[in-house]
Amino acid sequence: MTICRTCQTLDLVDTATGVVSSLKCRDWNCDNGKQNRITFWRRRVYVFQPEYMITITTRFSDFNRDNIREAQRLSARFLRALKYKGIKYISVTAYHGTIHYHIACRGTRPKQLWVKRKWMHLSGCYEVKVSDAHKKLPWYLIDKNAAQLPNHKEGETAWEGCTGNVFQRIRTSSNLFKKPIFQKPEKGRFRVFKRPDAESDAVDVDNEQDIATPPDGWR
């Protein structure tokens, strides 16, 4: 079981209300963070209500940095073509023998021949599929594919970090979800504290004042 240092040692304290909550992790390689991400994206796919799914397959069977970069570049060009046709999408990276992409879509459904020709022109591959959406699609996209990507490493660096800003597990079309109205809190309202039972060297925080013991009555 892998749990990152953020989940193990840090709490977020609202100084106005005194509410203490664990800092949520967004790391797919952390067991707690992965479950947070799965729940978050499964709900988003359900709210999106896709009408059909496009699957495109690349020729890359080796899961390394260069292949991931090239696959992401080719798929990004294909997603731009969907954008120009007015199609909204949620694209999920998958790996089962080869790197491929499952794209949940909503909008005018393209013909499979168009998808095949477009992807053939971009990547040289002809393995594509356009299928109807089903009720288990959120589980299939997130739990079965996005969450199951292998944690490839080069040295001590996780594979998502190796590709810089090029790689993303899940990509969506712009302005797909409305951003919540959020009023920026006053400065100093939220502070991060180290838990009393955490090891002293378990986490690195720049500001030593922010990891001081919380005042009495806050817990």
Image (cartoon, grey):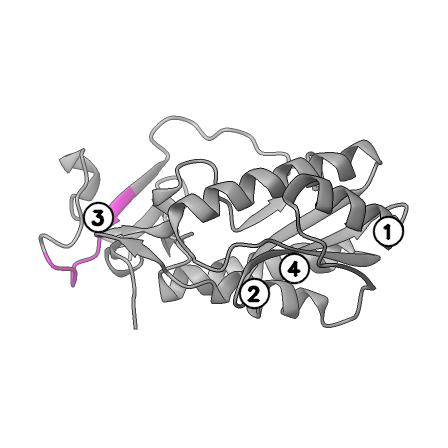
Q: Which of 139 and 99 lies nearest the eye of the viewer?
A: 99
Mark 4 and 2 residues: CB-CB less than 8 Å, in contact? no
The part of the image, by quadrant, that contains residue 131 is bottom right
Please tell me whether mark 4 sits on a helix, a strand or a loop: helix
Packing grade of label 1 (10 A; few <14, some 14-19, many >=20) is few
Q: Is residue 139 magenta?
A: no
Residue marked by disc 3: 214
Furthest residue to the top?
A: 187
C-alpha separation, residue under disc 3 versus residue under disc 4:
34 Å
Query: Magenta region's main secondary structure?
Result: loop
Name the residue beneath numbered marker 1. 113
Tag 2 and tag 3, C-beta contact below 8 Å: no
* Residue at the spot of label 2: 145
Residue span colored magenta: 192-199
In which quadrant will I find the N terminus? Answer: bottom left
The percent position of residue 195, horizontal first and vertical second, equals 21, 56
Give the secondary structure at mark 3: loop
